[in-house]
Amino acid sequence: MGGPAPRGPRVAAVRTAACNTPVVGTVVWDEEMAEAFDTVFSDQFDPAVLDPMAAGLAELAGDGAALEFGVGTGRVALALSARGVLVRGIELSPHMAARLERKPGAEAVDVVVGDMCTATVAGPFRLVYLVANTIMNVTTQDEQVAVFANAAAHLEPGGCFALEIVVPGIRGVAPGAPGRVFALEPDHAGIDTFDDVLGQVSWSLHWYQVDGRWLHHAAPFRYVWPSELDLMARIAGLRLAHRWADWRRQPFDAESRSQVVVYEKPRA
């Protein structure tokens, strides 16, 4: 089957404007957060976390190429590339892309700086993937549908779109409460506020201790239910292939707090 065209510059110029959001902005990591990102999320680099994900994605990619939406600083893309998969990425934040560019192995991962709703990369791809709740970084339903459509457009027939995303934690909010504290540790405090139940928009507020100072980050997210993801996939012409509770493929059930879901593009 076809694969991506020969590589150009490792970090391409901006191809499109950021997603148009009439109410709240699409989440963009600024320079300060990009510099601290790998430190703040150092636990996500633990082989116990990263290896099952990279192995699962490599299996889905097979001998084809993979495209990561929201490639960030390259945590997953570099691990997948190290397993022999040709990987490309789309990243909205030029600061995050610049961090990736400075890492060993980055020369093998081309990145387009643009938004995952509309940015394009020469393909097609056997696998498009979107991890770490990044679908929630676009904060309207229409734009989330556009992400699915863009993924489908990049896939070869029989290819897969894989997502890792939390199950909305609404049940953890006391009746009448505006939100919940989800993290309270010596170096991290986190609060979710549910500000727009109709639009499914919450704000996630974080305070991180990095290099002896406190770093504050707050951003809106649009949470998505499993059944809604399935409908978005159907709109994009994809069909459900798998849903697991995690990358170790534990069964997904009513008590699952996260999901790994795989949609397939029909061959005909």
Image (tube, rainbow, N blue to C red):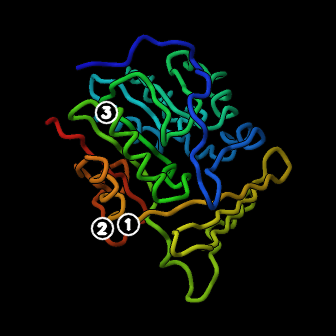
- Residue for point 36% across, 58% down: 229
Q: Secondary structure at mark 3?
A: strand
The alpha-carbon separation of the residues under discs 2 and 3 comes to: 29 Å
Return the residue at label 1: 256
Q: Which amino acid type is shown beneath numbered disc 3? A: Leu
Quadrant of the drawing holding the N terminus: top left
Return the residue at label 2: 253
Q: Which amino acid type is shown beneath numbered disc 2? A: Asp
Q: How many marks?
A: 3
The alpha-carbon separation of the residues under discs 1 and 3 comes to: 29 Å
Q: Secondary structure at mark 1?
A: loop
The one of 198 and 171 positioned closer to us in this rendering: 198
Q: In the figure, 121 relative to 29: above or below?
A: above
The nearer-to-camera label among 1 and 3 is 3
- Residue for point 45% across, 26% down: 121
- Residue for point 38% across, 66% down: 256
The alpha-carbon separation of the residues under discs 2 and 1 comes to: 5 Å
33 displayed left or right of 12: right
- Can you give x and y, in whole percent of width and height, for residue 260 in the image? 36, 52
